[in-house]
Amino acid sequence: MNIKKGLIFSAIFVSAGSLFAQTGNVKKAQTNFQKYFEVKQAGTPQLGTSYINTAKEAIDAAVVHEKTKESAEAWTIYSLVYGNIGADNNNEEQINLAKQAIATAKSLDKDKKQEENIKNSEHNLYAFSFNKGVAAWEKQDFTGAYASFNDALNYMPGDTTLTYYAGIAAVQSQDFQKGLEKYLALIDRKDYSEHKKIVKDIPNLYLSLNDTTNAIKYAGMAAKMYPEDNEIANQNINYNIALGNTTGILDELNSQIAKEPTNKTLYFYLGIAESSLKNSEKALEAYKKAIEIDPSYVDANINAGVTLVNIIKDELSEINADKALTNNQYNTKVNALKEKIKPAEAYFSKVVELESNNESALRGLKSVYDFLQVEDKAKAVQDKLDALKQ
């Protein structure tokens, strides 16, 4: 993912007038800073070097002078000057001085006259931390990127892009809890361009934290937020099936199949859901539909074969339990089962054709040949299974 660098926010003054003292070093610092800012805005910051240096010298003197050391306006200018120097030169020491000055200015600004200028100064700190985060990201220092983006949020609280960048940096550093916290902060911001991706990723983060309850909850929430998004709908179905909530997802699964009738995976999920509900015949039909769409669908072929074998086993148990059957009736019913089981051979054989050492398919074939009493084929499959164990 490419992260865009932010612009360095060079703070500007709210109309000076009564806000800044117009005498002595405070006035000198304010005047020179304004000149520096004007040439910087014009795209020629190098021409402002003498102005910013003069502003620095003047404000250094002002904040230690008896008459102005308790002045909110003096400390505000100090934060602006040092914030810009720090941002221009990527100098963390200067930025830290600006941070301290902002804290001092806020404590002294009882009448809030400097509030807007302090906010402007904080833009420099935001930009410095943001660009520091970008630099860390580009070096794949994701822990450092998170720390910087998170610090920038102190100056731009609630900023959607910044919150998202902090979140993905945390995820990249494998700190899923911090990443989740940032993503959850954006869950109600559907106006944000990355919102769909965020709500889709939240269930994955919960699963990474082994919280299956919330993984299912937020997968469902994402599906409700974006009902027309097939990828999110399928994710919701996948999570519910994988985590055992097959009963609760059956209606949504059938609804999604109606939207995507050629999606083989949905039929496969339907087979799993129906199987969990003991609806073996319906499960088999679902697997057969998936195979119809993709004859080489390995998992669907295996599940279709296993389901059919299990159906035959159940029916054979019923026949064996029926003591009223004559020998001829019994043999007739068993022969019918032998015909019924034959498609399972095809399902398992297809898998072996695609994956010759697939043990599940080989075991399935062995059970079919045993039931059909095809001894040579049963032995050949068993020999292959034995060879795989060596």
Image (spheres, helix red, strand yellow):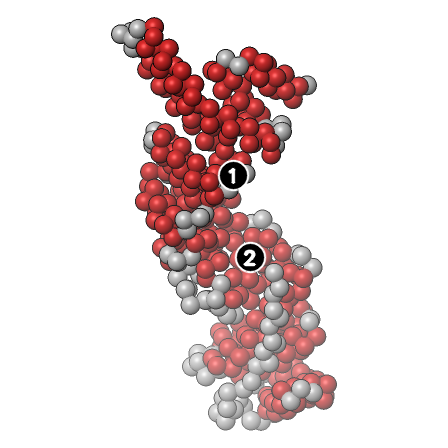
Q: What's the residue at 47%, 26% (across, down)? A: 344
Q: Amino acid at mark 2?
A: Ile
Q: How many marks?
A: 2
Q: In the image shown, does 247 or 172 lie closer to the viewer?
A: 247
Q: Amino acid at mark 1?
A: Pro
- Specify whether residue 382 is in view: no
Q: Which mark is residue 165?
A: none
Q: Is residue 324 left or right of residue 293?
A: left
Q: In the image shown, does 28 or 120 lie closer to the viewer?
A: 120
The part of the image, by quadrant, that contains residue 285 is: top left
State whether residue 2 is above or below residue 360. Answer: below
Q: Which residue is mark 1?
A: 295
- Specify whether residue 94 is in view: yes
x then y, percent, for residue 276: 37, 32
Q: What's the residue at 40%, 32% (across, down)? A: 284
Outermost residue on the left side: it is 324
Distance CA(mark 1)–CA(mark 2): 39 Å
State whether residue 35 is above or below residue 129. Answer: below
* Secondary structure found at label 1: loop
* Secondary structure found at label 2: helix
Q: Which residue is mark 2?
A: 168
State whether residue 356 is above or below residue 156. Answer: above
